[in-house]
Amino acid sequence: MNIHPDILLVDDDTSLLQLLTMRLEASGYSVVSETSGADALSYLETTLPNVVITDLKMDEMDGMDLFQRIHQRWPSVPVIFLTAHGSIPEAVKATQLGAFAFLTKPIDKHELHNCIEQALRFNAKSEHTANENWRSEIITQSHKMLEILEQAKLVAASDANILITGQSGTGKEVLAKSIHKASTRADKPFIAINCGAIPQALFESELFGHKKGAFTGATRDHEGLFKSADHGTLFLDEIGDIPVHLQVKLLRVIQEQRIRPVGSITDIPVNVRIISATHKNLLEEVNSGSFREDLYYRLNVVNLHLIPLDERKEDIPLLVKHFLTTIANRTQQPIKHMSAEGMEAFISGNWPGNIRQLANAVEQAVALSSGRIISLNTVQHTLAILPDLKLSLSDAKKAFERDYVIQLLKMTEGNITRAAKLAQRNRSDFHKILKRHNINTDHYKP
């Protein structure tokens, strides 16, 4: 949550927008500016500001239409109108309908500041923001997803174990983190582990810890992830990959809330809430004998199923915009924007790899676009060279990495320094990538 109050500023006059943004930021406010009502509504779907300030007269969607939509969906958010003298009757009507206030142009900065402070005092949104901040990393306007989030918020208040199911790339770990933030354990550790990535020989030690000398290489005590997550949340990703012989030990820990490190004769009490996730059908695993039925029911006290991206395509524009902003912030480069035709191509595409695949596609489109606007041609090229999703995830990642590096080398005419900079890697790491894929940079030099 931002330290300073959030203000959403909406005006299709970019020069006035810049002036007001500078004034408000100088007064200590956090300002997000949008140049149209449609963009403002998209922003509101993911983040509720403390106050909305909008011009009354705008092309396409005017301020009155924007206000009515805000007032219908988020009635607690105060809206302040900016209006010219000729529009005062409309502004008075807006005030009668529930708008907080209207100010006439030219805007007096002291009057604006006083009006904002009054709106903040009457706004019950501060508490609402604290309540909703738990899901700030989940970008959605899908009704199906919002229903899932309502369920997640309800169960977060309990200590019940949760099983999150869904296809790979749907955001299971992000949801797990959000549930932790909404729980009473929010100020305690959130520890995540991918069960499929741990060698079987080390699994017990990683989860429960070990004593010095318990086995070859155990040169010191290791507390394990259960102990690290004490009084917090332990997220067990790909729980379906846990070895069968260790499922009994995990079941015992869940039942007794005590662990015994490898090589120890003493149990240690732990207080851990478990959230697990899988893309597998665990009931089929239970029926086949590869997953214990009693462990399944201990983990699956509450089930939350994340829908695939193809069932929430209304979220694609929000997600694309979010990824573009994230990339610009990370690379400290000006933000690139998606053309309308390019966005349509993203919306109409198939996304079996879900949000993870979409993020990769946006990243690649940014890297391949030389201008500030990402064209349809760039998007089509990006979609055409995405990895073959019939491959395993590991092979698909390798294929994507190789194609991505080749595109960078083409863009930079084989200049390793420039290519490494675009990839946000140092030269040494980039050379390792080139060597891993047996890529000869001479082929791309003029």
Image (tube, helix red, strand yellow):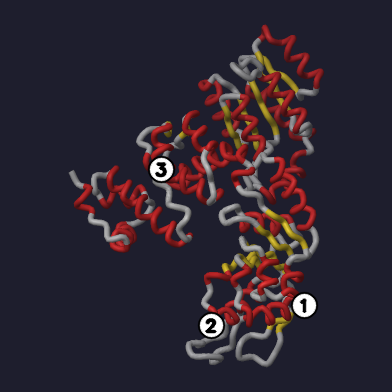
Name the one closer to the observer, 314 or 385. Answer: 385
Disc with the residue nearer the chain's start (1 vs 3) = 1
**Where residue 234 appears, x then y in whole percent?**
66, 68
Give amino acid for label 3: Ala
Which residue lies at the image location 71% right of the left edge and 44% below the top edge? 144
Residue 325: give its label: none
**Where residue 267 appears, x then y in whole percent?**
71, 86
Marks 1 and 3, how far apart in space? 50 Å
Q: Secondary structure at mark 1?
A: helix
Q: Quadrant of the C terminus?
A: top left
Name the one closer to the observer, 435 or 294. Answer: 294
Q: Secondary structure at mark 3?
A: helix
Give amino acid for label 2: Ala
Give amino acid for label 1: Gln
Q: How many labels, in total?
A: 3
Which residue lies at the image location 66% right of the left edge and 17% below the top edge? 56
Q: Which residue is identified by label 3?
A: 384
Which residue lies at the image location 67% right of the left edge and 39% below the top edge? 141
Q: Which residue is identified by label 2?
A: 201
Q: Which residue is identified by label 1?
A: 255
Disc with the residue nearer the chain's start (2 vs 3) = 2
* Dot 3 crowding, Cα within 10 Å, few <14, some 14–19, many 20+: few
Marks 2 and 1, how far apart in space? 24 Å
**Where residue 425 appears, x then y in whole percent?**
36, 55
Please say if the residues under marks 2 and 3 sit with CB atoms less than 8 Å apart. Answer: no
Disc with the residue nearer the chain's start (2 vs 1) = 2
Up-down relation of residue 230 to residue 366 (above or below): below
* Dot 1 crowding, Cα within 10 Å, few <14, some 14–19, many 20+: few
231 displayed left or right of 13? right
